[in-house]
Image (spheres, rainbow, N blue to C red):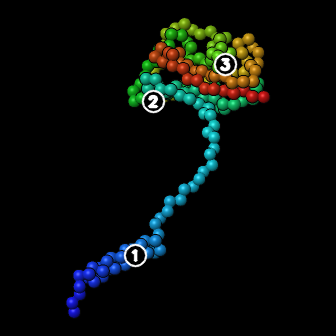
Amino acid sequence: MVVSNRKLLFLLLAILVGAFLCLVIVRLVIAPPARETQKVLPVVPTPPKNYKFIEVREIKITLEIPKTEVKTGRAISIKLILENIGDAPKKLSFSSGQKFDVVVDDFREKEIWRWSADKVFTMMLQEDVFGPGQREVYAVSWNQRDLQGRLVPVGEYRIKGESMARELRGSVVALDLKITD
């Protein structure tokens, strides 16, 4: 039996089309592709952080308050934390007995309250050595009163914490605070 080239070509094309259709059917019907399901999550606003930190010469300086929004008249606990995050001991030099300070101001940079305003410190040189991982926590409480003893009005304020160590001088950590009714 003699088959012409044209018939042979047609037969070969039919076989190829059939094979292709078989692959498509197997792919779609028998083994459908895995589909990624995307879960749509609701957008939740991120609450403001109640702490901030900076790192200076392998010392982490953290300022922390319990909440960023408080009711008027309630005392606010404020912590300034120094931590050696390096692998070697760090020496911090102080020119007086004052190791830190905390200031509250309005957003116009007007000082409302300063922790050290009514304090007296010894005048002596001191050196503290912080070992690797060592932390020092300085805690104060602000009764929401200004430097004249008046309750501050409802509004937005900025709390600033600073170490008085010569090596960290000028390194201020700030947090925003909202006082409400």
Mark 1 is surrounded, within 10 Å at the Cα level, by few (under 14), some (14 to 19) or many (20 or more) other residues, namely few
Q: Element type at marker 1? A: helix
Q: Residue 179: name its quadrant.
A: top right
Q: Amino acid at mark 1?
A: Leu
Residue located 64% across and 19% down the image = 107
Q: Position of residue 91 (x, y in %)?
A: 43, 19
Q: Element type at marker 3? A: loop
Q: Position of residue 94 (x, y in %)?
A: 50, 13
The correct choice, above or below, for 118 with respect to 33 in the image is above
Q: Position of residue 37 (x, y in %)?
A: 53, 59
Q: Quadrant of the C terminus?
A: top right
Decide if residue 124 is in sight here.
yes
* Residue located farthest toward the top when viewing the structure as drawn: 123
Identify the mark nearer the N-term, 2 or 1: 1
- Identify the residue under disc 3: 106
Residue located 55% across and 23% down the image = 173
- Identify the residue under disc 2: 85
Question: Closer to the camera: disc 3 or disc 1?
Answer: 1
Q: Position of residue 165 (x, y in %)?
A: 50, 16
Identify the mark nearer the N-term, 3 or 2: 2
Q: Quadrant of the N terminus?
A: bottom left
Q: Nearer the viewer, residue 177 or 166?
A: 177
- Identify the residue under disc 1: 21
Decide if residue 113 is in sight here.
no
